[in-house]
Image (tube, grey):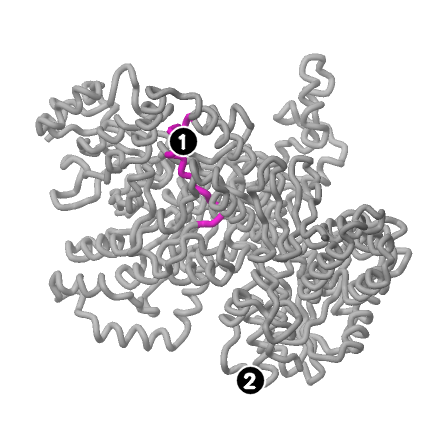
Amino acid sequence: MTNQKQNIPTNNGKSFMTYDAASPALQVQPAHSPVLSHPLSTGRVATSPTSAQPEIGTPSRAWRIRADSWEFLGYALRQLANGSGSNGQSGLLGQIRRALALLDSVEPYWAFPGRASMDRLNSIIAAGQYQDAVDLVDGIRARMGRARPPAEQPTTGHSEAAEPTHDTDLTAERPRFEVLVVDDIPVQDAEALRNDMLAQRRPADAFSYDVNVVSSYEDALVALLLNPDIQACVLRPGFGIRASRPLGSDLKRVVSRHVEDDLERLRPIDRILRLAERIAELRPELDVYLVAGVAIEGLAGSLTRRFARIFRREDRLDLHLSLLAGVAGRYETPFFTALQEYSRRPASVFHALPISRGGSVGNSPWIRDMADFYGQNLLLAETSATSGGLDSLLDPHGSIKKAQTLAARAFGAEKTFFVTNGTSTANKVVHQAIVAPGDIVLVDRNCHKSHHYALMLSGAQVAYLDAYPLDQYSFYGAVPLESIKKMLLDYRRAGRLDRVKMITLTNCTFDGIVYDPERVMEECLAIKPDLVFLWDEAWFAFAGFHPVYRRRTAMAAAAKLEAQFRDPGFSVRHAKQAAELPDAESGGPEADDAWLRTRLIPDPAKARLRVYATQSTHKTLTSLRQGSMIHVFDQDFEQLNGEAFREAYMTHTSTSPNYQILASLDIGRRQAELEGFALVQKQADLAVSIAQAVARNPLLKKYFRILGAKELVPEEFRETDCSMPLSQGLSAFDEAWRRDEFVVDPSRLTLDIGLTGIDGDTFKHDHLMDKYGIQVNKTSRNSVLFMTNIGTSRSAVAYLVEVLVKLAESFETEKRTLGPRGLRALEARVSALSSAPPALPDFSSFARRFRTDATSPDGNLRAAYFETYKDGATEYVEPAELAARVEAGHEVVSAGFVTPYPPGFPILVPGQVITGNALAFMAALDTREVHGFDPALGYRVFTEEWLTSAS
């Protein structure tokens, strides 16, 4: 009887991989407990009932499926080569054949290792030459891992065969990428084309590339979804439409959304243009070239916007040089390069900064360990200079300006500004630039504290919007669009809409709730055509580098709306709706109700897109801490706001910015453009694997639960019904992010720990961090928030799941040792954490003294804040006495910001009327950190005498 499963040790020594012959699944499991699986069967290569060729399944898992399959082949072939698998040789060969069938279905979408290598691998395995097969697989895996191939590696396909032997070492060192050529030509012609292109490569090239040819429109889309190594596409007339291989249901649904029914009827050139547009939607960072055999001079003027360049077929060298130049344009890091060059030049410093070039460190007997720890390059790059190739952040004209221009291109902005002291400062810059004293700003009360302080400094009239509450978990979701529209319509009804200047929302929230910015801006502009939008995307910088995530970024939404506003059909739709809706001015409350119920279409002749996004690059992309960016898509920037923005930037930006942070922003942008798609895809997929591990393991399910959309987004805001769409495939993920008002970022994992009987703060510090060294994002009373990022590894995921299993086992052990009294105490703790706490307090109101009139929701935060500076205006009141005053009907007004961590937003702001609900919520919190509350003195409030005399 043959073995049906093979255990493969992994490189962390604590887990093993199982390849199941009954199902093409590779599973990574902690050695003591089979809990974490990465199934190929869900990413799936299923056998089509009409074809023996496997179907290509979920594209979001392709990177993992491919890597696991090659790893299994290496292990299984090594078993056969050394004879250790002889007892189960038949079963092992069957598993190898399944893995090869899987790879044969996906490898055609990669240039490397190529058809020749796959054919050779199949043939030498069939011949029983297992050691040769091991050598070939090891060489392929080394190249896939971007490691130097072994010197004795045999030729592994067309790419290596076409490369000059004297270039072998150089190509191992240089960055490699792949070029996708789309043309329906015979196999031998495709091979000739490939070799012809590769023959143009030279040892002096900065990069090396491989070429892959696919034959159809759909195959091109599949390749772009599966293969993140593609950096350029070459389109040639004559390609077909349908995929050359069976597609699984998930991939078929995704591709079908980008393939219109009229493709068959289009002229070849129009089909090419349509494909170029789809490539720009899926992977906008890629360079797209057109190679045609017709009179291209007549095409050039009309096609320039869609293609980086147009060539005739014989322009091989120019195409080669353009491919390299296109990648070089994204690889370029103007400021990082300038800083490196500056640090290499000799210089004498007669300026500030004694640490510059290590001057105060290198010869010191007392702080030499600083140089040992940080290294010489860091000290050489520390300088106050703005010349010698460097630049001034406050007035950039050289390398910083160019770096910011490249960042704007990468993130889809019109302008981008670097910020070296975090998104807190970025938010203050935008608020000051846009808002004048007395302007009304609508803002999510649950936003980061920097917005509250910025609004206080700017003198805005603040109108707080309430997000929907998640009382069970003690945090908020996001602000419903209906609430935003209602407040705007209320201001219109009150005749004060002209004073509303800006709306500020957080996308995505700390807990991963993501808005639909396109819809929010579209409908708001229908009511207030000149409304300015500030989207705080501190946790969402990565989103622009994945086709599904990108749709919900502020910059992508602004660009799409701008294109729609130029479409004559959009004006027709607006005019039709305007004729049907009741008049805004003469209609009564019934008119407002009609506007609330309708998905509004703005007047493109009046609407102005004025959109700002602030991003903490350091939170989700590669950057040193505090590296942030401000992205601008403002049609009126230079006319209305340019000078104000520059003054605000001067106000909040240090005259001594950290050059290392600036350089890291530059290098982080490079990485995002060149490998952001691969990294974000991996980030989301690894998070799904954690969620699936928790959901599938019987022991973990006893104590933990990952919260999905069904728990975090109320049903009225969801058209789809899947709690974790990405776990069901890319098509379900895409559908939810197209249709639902709010979605949950799959890389944010809220772990419900209520059944452990341990509160979130204790679980974080005592169990995860102190005991196992696991850092987490935030906690609530009964949850812990994990997030994967572009730096998360599979080993780290396995370790996290292993730790959760160990904790669950310890809870089981502890439970068995408890007596009746201990069990009752545990049950009480579980009940307290699992039952609903006091409801999250909505914003009550500003005291009448700080409002424009009795009916206005907005208040003057700055007036309230600075009034506390006056003698006799405030006092401290202990919680019990304060609760008694509130219960007795006294109006008690907060004199400061009170912000508990978690949840991390102000429960009270200056000038706010304190309610019993707010006090009850604060009393129920078991957090260690509360800003603005003194446990010894209590709450700081305005004295009754002051409020009475002032009124």
Quarter holding residue 267: bottom right
The picture places residue 6, in percent across and down from the top left corner, at 70, 48
> Where is residue 365 shown, x and y percent of the image?
72, 13
For the residue pair 115 and 314, the one nearer the viewer reads as: 115
> Which quadrant of the figure has residue 191?
bottom right
Q: Left or right of 854: which side holds 331?
A: right
The amino acid pointed to by label 1 is Thr
Report how far apart the C-alphas of labels 1 and 2 lie in the structure. Answer: 59 Å
Q: With respect to residue 855, does 285 lie above or below?
A: below
Residue at 65% in and 39% down:
15
Q: Quadrant of the C terminus?
A: top left
Q: Nearer the viewer, mark 1 or mark 2?
A: 1
Secondary structure beneath disc 1?
helix
> How would you rate the neighbour count of disc 2 (Cα within 10 Å): few for under 14, some for 14-19, many for 20 or more?
few
Q: In this picture, is 162 found above or below 690?
A: below
Q: Label 2 amino acid?
A: Glu
Quick check: can you spot residue 418? no
**What residue is disc 1 on?**
756
Q: Which residue is mark 2?
A: 264
Please name the residue shown 9% across and 29% down the image: 889
Q: Is residue 110 magenta?
A: no
Q: Position of residue 588 (x, y in %)?
A: 11, 63
**CB atoms of marks 1 and 2 within 8 Å:** no
Q: Which residues are magenta?
A: 745-762
| Tag shown at residue 387 | none
Q: Residue furthest front?
A: 1
Q: Residues within 10 Å of mark 1 (few under 14, many from 20)?
A: many
Q: Say whether residue 750 is magenta.
A: yes
From the top left corner, tell me how far across and down residue 524 is, in percent.
30, 59
Mark positioned earlier in the residue sequence (1 or 2): 2
Note whether residue 476 is visible.
yes
**Considering the numbered disc 2 on the image, is that residue within a helix, a strand or a loop?**
helix
